[in-house]
Amino acid sequence: MQRERPFIPLMWPFTRSTPSSREPEPQVQPQSLGLVADVVRALPDPVIVVEGNGNVLLANDHAKTVLESDPQGLHISASIRAPALLEAVTAVMAGEDPLVVEYELRVPMQRSFHAHVSPLGKNEGAVIVLRDLTREQQIERMRADFVANASHELRTPLASLSGFIETIQGAAKNDEKAQVRFLGLMRSQADRMKRLIDDLLSLSRIEMNEHVRPSAEVDLTQVAGHVRDTLSGMAQEFACELKVASDGPLPVLGNRDELVQVLQNLVENALKYGSSGKRVDVECRRQGGFAEVTVRDHGPGIAAEHIPRLTERFYRVNVQESRSRGGTGLGLAIVKHIVNRHRGRLVIASEIGKGSEFVIRLPLKT
């Protein structure tokens, strides 16, 4: 809050004691409702108009997008579960001046908002104007995380490059064979740095937009087929059979490129670390109101103690094996954040000696 104000006890929905002689509070007049609705729809920010009884009278499309639902006709507390904002609405409708509050929502995604609450007429209700602060805060976190992660993870390949350069300039100055070998190693370290920077930038972009749910229609079955075709050459290199099975189209609301990246990361991991089982299966199916895609390998499996940490940045079950196979330790972190953005779930199951199973579950488009 910007200023202190007396505490007003809340009784939902927004009941408060009034003198018996007081006339009922007037509501928004019908003749003015059309004009108010036109103004609310035209505003560029999310706007919600609340009646004196606490029910939402109007909400523009921006507000519906932010709330991921249509709050009209419902009590404001059913759409926004933020005590600070609800208290501000109650106070303004009780006669206080306009108030400004900042609050957070944690479901379905953590988001931060700035809300300006003003009275509507005389005891007729309130107008809430929202401003989403999530992107600004995520940009700041992205900058800090990128600097911290890049400085930590780039130190090793940079040290290797420096050592190889010193060797070529010194002991191997006149050794052509050694120079060729060291230059090959330097190229490998440079490629590793490029992959690392690309994945860090990709993860940062995804995190920055994680609170915004994609709205395009994407067929997960078609995405799975595309990934199979793209990685068929890699499967041949590992002498591993890559199969996709489906019971039909799986339409979801999503970003196609990001969903391709999810399945590509999961299938690449299955081929890199589970190809000893000689088969990787991708299964697409409907499960209730959800689309499920399962990527299953038949390799050595993962010990149970590692599973809860697999989606952490830079967490590796075997550091040396991961680096030798070109891994950056960011692939599953990217998968997790993309799935979160699509309001889905990632489920991981594995057993030593029996392979691993990664399941993404997204709401079907209705």
Image: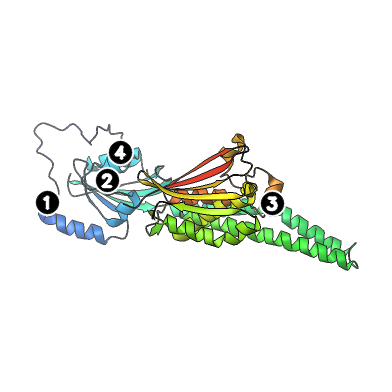
Question: Under tag 1, what secondary structure?
Answer: loop
Residue marked by disc 1 = 29
Looking at the image, tell me whether mark 4 or mark 3 is earlier in sequence order: 4
Of labels 3 and 2, earlier in sequence is 2
Q: Gap in Å between the C-alphas at discs 4 and 1? A: 25 Å
CA–CA distance in space, label 2 to label 1: 22 Å
Secondary structure at numbered mark 3? helix
Residue toward you, 307 or 82: 307
- Return the x and y of residue 203 as percentages of the image width and height: 54, 54
Q: Residue at x 57, y 58 (%)?
A: 201
Give the distance between the C-alpha atoms of the residues marked 4 and 3, in whole angstroms: 53 Å
Observer-nearest of 26 and 67: 67
Which residue lies at the image location 61% right of the left edge and 41% below the top edge? 301
Q: Which residue is mark 4?
A: 87
**Which quadrant is the N terminus positioned in?**
top left
Q: CA distance from mark 3 to mark 2?
A: 60 Å
First reached walking from the N terminus: tag 3 or tag 1: 1
Q: CA distance from mark 2 to mark 4?
A: 13 Å
What residue is pinned by disc 2? 97
Q: Which residue is mark 3?
A: 323
Sort mark 3 into few (<14), some (14-19) or many (20+) by Cα contacts within 10 Å.
few
Q: Is residue 207 visible?
A: no
Which numbered disc flags the more N-terminal residue, 4 or 1? Answer: 1
Q: Is residue 220 left or right of residue 179?
A: left
SS at badge 4: helix
Residue 80 rendering spot, x and y as whole percentages: 32, 43
Quarter of image, res 222? bottom left
Q: Is residue 58 left or right of residue 181?
A: left
Q: Nearer the viewer, mark 3 or mark 1?
A: 3
Mark 2, mark 1: which one is toward the viewer? 1
The amino acid type of the residue labelled 3 equals Arg
Residue 347: mark: none
